[in-house]
Image (cartoon, rainbow, N blue to C red):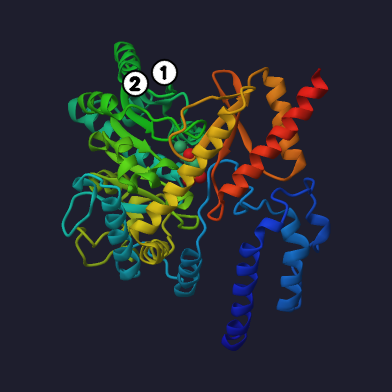
């Protein structure tokens, strides 16, 4: 393919994607295929001779699309949203076109500097304390990670290094191995599974703190565990708070937890993967109060801020905490510039060496929507969640299982877990809408998350009518 053909095919591809997104409602939101459906449809090995673009595009429709779950369908209410917007898609194309690998400032200065500035922009949009911003010569700053799971791992590893250095500074005889075995990290019993996985990777214990009636960790619960563990000779070093848990969008009590962490020299990381985007609205910013006590803060603009996957933004108060933990400087990567403000080598802020020019997506989206446009988008989703909640509350056979604060509604039929499992199965088998469940204190609960950029009140109304109809059939069959 030469540039002339690329021009032609590129325009066709834009048309294909625009048609796909514009008419996505007409596609069945969840596919009918069985595991292994794809292999028999394509050859066993790559072709020896080049093939035609038309043939590939035909196969996209015939082989790929039948096995796609349409996350951007307005009938998709599963998991949490994943962002999609046209400005982000275009910026990603440009990123692919430039195709640089921005591991150091020198490896592509624009890639590094735009990222630092975009993280400052976004930090200001959510009113992060200034210590988290890079500014011209700040000690903090932000970085784009691939996912929230990676961001937590980066924070956990940096905290581990810091804790080991701290203990060794008081007792030089202890080896890294002696100390690591005694380190203990904490998170909520509602935290995302990635926190536990990150603990496995980092080789440290992660304990789950029991949550209160609102599914939140409060200060006294953390205090109790920390005191118990210290008395047993363990070293508490890391706490991962969650703002907007995946199960039910609950919020840990940062204002109680933060001072305990600071006093005990426990690194406080905040995982706000989904909820973080809402903090651009002044009416939701109070949910972030207490961030001033944190060492690191992360959320996913690729969930709810219209910046396509992958874009998970992580801020730290002290960039030296990361660069101390991850800095390895072989001679082929060295250059003459000093680390400060806009000049940083992002390879020391992450696990891989290579990194894409992802900040272009943020730049395009922030400029094309403006902060006001993004705020409107968040508010619309929250309003639709409340519309759905009100529908649920009008039918007294159903109950709401957790406070609706943002765009997630947890609900169930008042009745057995089996009944609710059957309801979810009939919803997903019908293929008209798509939902996933969660467990809350042993109860099987249905999660209804407002997801698509194009979802409207009509889709919510349709979804509820459909759910009620399936519930009626189930309850009738039971009698
Ligand atoms: C979605 C989610 C994650 C995982 O996000 P990735 O970016 O896919 O790793 C982590 N924590 C919470 C609270 C989430 O909602």
Residue 350, given in percent of the width and then of the height, sits at: 38, 50
| Label 1: few (<14), some (14–19) or many (≥20) C-alpha neighbours in 10 Å | few
Calculate the distance from the C-alpha at mark 1 to the C-alpha at mark 2.
Answer: 7 Å
**The label number, if any, that marks residue 156 in the structure image:** none
Residue at left offset 33%, top offset 13%: 224
Note whether 7 is above or below 241 in the view shown.
below
Q: Quadrant of the N terminus?
A: bottom right
Tell me, yes or no, whether the two marked residues, 1 and 2, touch with CB atoms within 8 Å: yes
Residue 44, given in percent of the width and then of the height, sits at: 80, 61
Note whether 316 is above or below 446 in the view shown.
below
Note whether 476 is above or below 456 in the view shown.
above
Q: Quadrant of the C terminus?
A: top right
Residue highlighted by disc 2: 218
Residue highlighted by disc 1: 212
Task: Determine whether the residue tagged by mark 2 lies in a helix, strand or loop.
Answer: loop
Looking at the picture, tell me which residue is in the foreground, 385 or 233. Answer: 385
């Amino acid at each position: 393919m030469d540039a002339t053909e690329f021009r032609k095919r590129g325009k066709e591809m834009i048309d294909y994607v625009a048609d796909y997104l514009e008419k996505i409602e007409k596609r069945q939101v969840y596919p009918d295929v069985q595991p292994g459906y794809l292999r028999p449809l394509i050859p066993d090995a790559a072709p020896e001779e080049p093939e035609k673009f038309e043939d590939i595009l035909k196969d996209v429709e015939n082989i790929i699309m039948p096995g796609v779950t349409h996350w951007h369908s307005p009938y998709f209410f599963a998991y949490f949203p994943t962002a999609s917007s046209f400005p982000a898609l275009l910026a990603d194309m440009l990123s692919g076109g430039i195709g640089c690998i921005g591991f150091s400032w020198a490896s592509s200065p624009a890639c590094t500097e735009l990222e630092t500035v975009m993280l400052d922009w976004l930090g200001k949009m959510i009113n992060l304390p200034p210590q988290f911003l890079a500014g011209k010569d700040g000690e903090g700053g932000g970085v784009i990670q691939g996912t929230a799971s990676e961001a937590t791992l980066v924070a956990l590893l940096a905290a581990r290094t810091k804790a080991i250095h701290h203990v060794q500074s008081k007792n030089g005889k202890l080896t890294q191995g002696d100390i690591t075995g005694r380190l203990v990290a904490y998170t909520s019993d509602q935290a995302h599974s990635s926190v536990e996985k990150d603990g496995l990777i980092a080789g440290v214990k992660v304990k789950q703190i029991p949550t209160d009636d609102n599914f939140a960790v409060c200060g006294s619960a953390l205090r109790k565990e920390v005191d118990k563990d210290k008395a047993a000779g363990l070293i508490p070093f890391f706490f991962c708070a969650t703002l907007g848990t995946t199960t039910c969008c609950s919020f840990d009590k940062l204002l109680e937890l933060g001072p305990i962490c600071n006093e005990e020299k426990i690194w406080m990381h905040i995982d706000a993967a989904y909820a973080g985007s809402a903090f651009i609205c002044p009416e939701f910013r109070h949910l972030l109060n207490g961030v001033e006590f944190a060492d690191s803060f992360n959320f996913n603009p690729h969930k709810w801020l219209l910046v396509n996957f992958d874009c998970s933004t992580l801020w730290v108060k002290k960039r030296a905490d990361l660069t101390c933990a991850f800095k390895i400087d072989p001679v082929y990567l060295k250059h003459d510039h000093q680390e400060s403000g806009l000049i940083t080598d992002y390879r020391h802020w992450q696990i891989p060496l290579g990194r894409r020019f992802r900040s272009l997506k943020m730049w395009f989206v922030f400029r094309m929507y403006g902060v006001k446009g993004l705020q409107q988008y968040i508010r619309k989703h929250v309003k639709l969640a409340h519309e759905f909640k009100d529908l649920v509350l009008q039918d007294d056979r159903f109950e709401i299982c957790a406070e609706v604060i943002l765009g997630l509604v947890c609900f169930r039929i008042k009745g057995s877990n089996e009944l609710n499992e059957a309801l979810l199965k009939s919803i997903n088998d019908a293929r008209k809408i798509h939902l996933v469940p969660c467990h809350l204190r042993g109860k099987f609960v249905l999660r209804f998350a407002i997801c698509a950029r194009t979802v409207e009140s009509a889709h919510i109304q349709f979804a509820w009518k459909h759910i009620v109809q399936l519930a009626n059939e189930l309850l009738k069959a039971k009698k």
